[in-house]
Image (cartoon, helix red, strand yellow):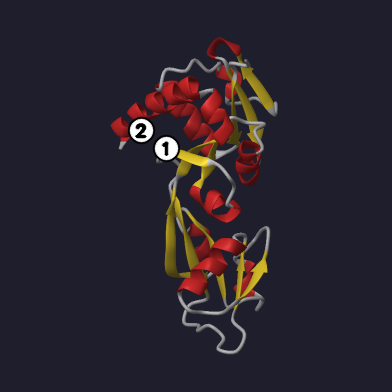
């Protein structure tokens, strides 16, 4: 049996904060780990292999079993709806999903449009509000959509709110709080349960101390 635990992680803020948690949990990660440009990093002394991926791809790698576990934002998990188990709220990279738009504007009564990177989340939210909207999927610069008249509202991730403010937008509704979660492939959880439970236990102690 392969005893190496493969972890899919996104680069950037989540990667840095997750690496810090792992070190505090007692895992010996090499100093060059944080600055490596490799896509796969082996940490043989800990029996760990890391796959560095785009945030939206992490749940896909875990679902298909090329990674045993992963670290992904709750926003990605809600949007992707992959077949994975959520084991632990790591309480890092806190932010939230919100509805925003130009100040003092109302939704179009005839054909309201919402631009977002999160079409599934946005559609579900407005459906729960009893509103039928047209969802416009964008991949970047969501704040542009209401400014250029493409949409009445946007649904986007908010950390400090600075980007929205600098583009003259205001927040109308807060949809859901977002933090990064530890997820696992269901088959891996059965095969490597001892290793995974040990990881969860160690990380849980760090998270509870920092809470």
Q: Quadrant of residue 79?
A: bottom right
Label 2 neighbourhood size at 10 Å, few (<14), some (14-19), many (20+)? some
Query: Where's the N terminus, which quadrant?
Result: top right
Is residue 66 shown above or below 162? above
Residue 90: x and y, percent? 42, 37
Q: Which of pointers 2 and 1 lies earlier in the amino acid sequence?
A: 1
Query: Where's the C terminus, which quadrant?
Result: top left
Q: Is residue 82 left or right of residue 22?
A: right
Residues at circles 2 and 1 in contact by the CB criterion of under 8 Å: yes
Residue drawn at x 52%, y 33% is 16
Residue 69: x and y, percent? 55, 32
Mark 2: secondary structure: helix
Residue 6: x and y, percent? 60, 25
Numbered circle sitting on residue 18: none
Residue drawn at x 56%, y 50% is 76
Numbered circle sitting on residue 88: 1
Mark 1: secondary structure: strand
Residue drawn at x 40%, y 22% is 25
Q: Give whichever of 52, 144 is nearer the camera.
A: 52
**Residue 44 appears in the picture as rendered:** yes
- The residues tagged by marks 2 and 1 sit, at their Cα atoms, a distance apart of 9 Å
Farthest residue toward the top?
45
Residue wearing tag 2? 207
Q: Give whichever of 118, 29 is nearer the camera.
A: 118
């Amino acid at each position: 049996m392969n005893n190496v635990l493969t972890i899919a992680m996104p680069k950037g803020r989540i990667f840095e904060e997750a690496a810090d948690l792992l070190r505090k949990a007692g895992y010996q990660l090499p100093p060059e780990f944080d600055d490596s440009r490799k896509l796969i990093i082996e940490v043989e002394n800990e029996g760990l292999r890391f796959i560095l991926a785009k945030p939206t791809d992490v749940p896909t790698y875990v679902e298909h079993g090329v990674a045993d576990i992963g670290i992904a934002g709750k926003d990605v998990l809600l949007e992707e709806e992959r077949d994975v188990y959520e084991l632990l709220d790591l309480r890092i990279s806190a932010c939230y999903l919100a509805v925003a738009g130009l100040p003092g504007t109302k939704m179009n009564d005839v054909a309201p449009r919402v631009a977002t990177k999160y079409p599934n989340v946005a559609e579900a939210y407005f459906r729960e509000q009893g509103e039928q909207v047209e969802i416009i999927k964008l991949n970047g610069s969501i704040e542009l959509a209401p400014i250029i008249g493409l949409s009445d509202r946007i649904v986007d991730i908010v950390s400090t709110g600075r980007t929205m403010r600098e583009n003259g937008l205001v927040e109308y509704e807060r949809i859901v709080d977002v933090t990064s979660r530890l997820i696992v492939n269901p088959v891996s959880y059965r095969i490597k349960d001892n290793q995974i439970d040990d990881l969860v236990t160690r990380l849980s102690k760090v998270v509870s101390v920092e809470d």
